[in-house]
Amino acid sequence: MAKYSEEFKIKLVTEYLHGNLGYQSLSKKYNIPSTFQLRNWVRSYKEQGMDGLKRKRTKKEYSVQFKLDAIQFMLETGASYLETAVQFDLNNPSLISRWLKTFREQGIEGLKQKTKGRPSMSKKPNKAKKKEEKKLTREEELERENELLRLENAYLKKLRAFRENPNAFLEKHKQKWHSSLKKKDSD
């Protein structure tokens, strides 16, 4: 919600234009912290009429060329942010200051429209698809197959040893587990 309503702005501007109070007096009378805001309203009203005081209900997207034109006008003429806003029919001079800052930091790329919100879930690449996309060379495929066969062979040897003599197999591996646990405990 806007800090000041349109009705309030119109009231102050008309009181300034038709009354005998200055910016300072009106600011004190209506408890406005600075005369700067009132000056902006009066100038916007003089240049754009009632439209200059109205708050825009929708955010308008400006093209990169429009932003560059506004920045170029301001820099070439030495106009203030407010004068540039009036020239380009904008009722918010802070837009131009933001554009100028972005332009100085990021160049033209910074002035381009950015997508808002979170990216769509459907656009995220699937991990399984990534693995499929990664093509292995023939040599890499053979190395992978050899490794899998070695693992299978080792597993089958242990299974055979366990079937032939389960107690001896368990004792042998029990000693390995205990010795590795003792090493961890002593560290």
Image (cartoon, helix red, strand yellow):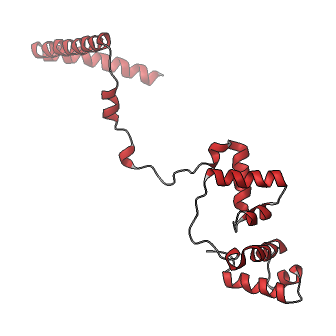
Location of the N terminus (image quadrant) = bottom right
Task: Return the x and y of residue 131 as percentages of the image width and height.
Answer: 33, 28
Query: Is 74 left, or right, of 174 in this rendering?
Result: right
* Residue 110, position as x, y percentages in the image: 64, 46
**Image quarter for residue 94?**
bottom right
* Residue 53 screen position, x and y as percent: 70, 76
- Is residue 187 shown left or right of residue 67? left
Q: Is residue 25 left or right of residue 30?
A: right
Viewer-closest of 172 and 25: 25
Nearer-the-camera pick, 114 or 73: 73
- Residue 67 placement, left or right of 165: right
In the rendered image, the vertical position of residue 48 relative to residue 29, given as above or below: above
Residue 183 point in image, percent of width and height: 42, 19
Q: Give me the residue at 83% from left, 85% from top.
A: 17
Q: Which residue is pictured at 51% across the width and 54% down the height?
A: 116
**Residue farthest to the bottom?**
19
Judged from this view, the residue extending furthest toward the left is 164
